Image (spheres, helix red, strand yellow):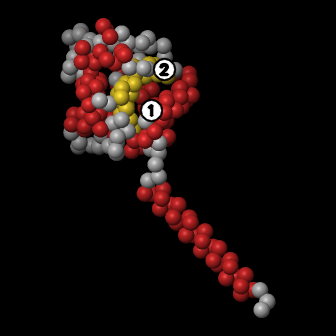
Amino acid sequence: MPVSGGGIFVNYRRDGSQTMAELIDRDLAEKFGRDQVFLDCRSIRIGDDYARKLLEQVRECRVLLVIIGPAWLSLKTSSGARRIDDPADWIHREIAEAFRAGVRVVPVLLDGTPRLVEAQLPAGIAALARCQHVVVRLGHTRPDVQELIRRLIEIEPRLQRRFGRASLLTVAIVLVVFLAMILLIAIAIKLWSPS
């Protein structure tokens, strides 16, 4: 499902940080709503042009979380070059697009992954090393993600879950049923009370 009205885009490598990305996605969606969190494997519908959809969602999001595991910088292509140095690498492309679009980028360092250093990154995404990061530890995923959520709300209050149409409809139905019950009780009292 596409992110509606801007939200959170989760950028991650399938080899190395997918499980943690899915845990983070689960907690974010629970707090902000599924329509406010974009994770490619859950959010892109079958038959969609994934290349167009990914870049479109990056440009429309409010925050791009870059999930960075210990091997993030060192993963290699089949020719032996670092994947992050390849401008066609999707992680590289999504981060570069976020910077071009003025999206807030937050590095999420996993399990003791050291801070990034500008000199280690390609020029188009070197600014990632200057972005304030958060840490998510494997043994403390829930509390660390709750802290991430608190900090996201602090910088982007519009991310707070809003009542959707379904929620408002539910509230309206409950209110109507409640008022109908009060009316029926009042009628019953009137009918049974001595005149």
Q: Nearer the viewer, residue 92 or 102?
A: 102
The picture quadrant where one finds residue 68 is top left
Per the rendering, the mark at residue 135 is 2
For disc 1, the marked residue is: 155
Instruction: Identify the element where label 1 is drawn.
Output: helix
Compared with 55, 134 (above or below) is above
Q: Position of residue 18 (x, y in %)?
A: 39, 26
156 in relation to 19, above or below: below
Residue 161 sits above or below residue 41 on the image: below
**Contact check, label 1 and label 2, Cβ < 8 Å:** no
* Quadrant, the N terminus: top left
Q: Does dot 2 land on a helix, a strand or a loop? A: strand
Question: Marks 1 and 2, how far apart in space?
Answer: 17 Å
Numbered-mark total: 2
Give the amino acid type for the residue marked by disc 1 in the picture: Ile
- 171 or 2: which is nearer to us? 171
Point out the tag, 1 or 2, that comes first from the N-terminus.
2
Q: Comparing marks 1 and 2, which lies closer to the viewer?
A: 1
Work out whether residue 77 can be spotted.
no
Residue 16 location, x and y as percent?
39, 20
**x then y, percent, for residue 59:** 27, 35
Badge 1 crowding class, 10 Å Cα cut-off, few under 14, some 14 to 19, many 20 or more, is few
At x 44%, y 53%, the residue is: 164
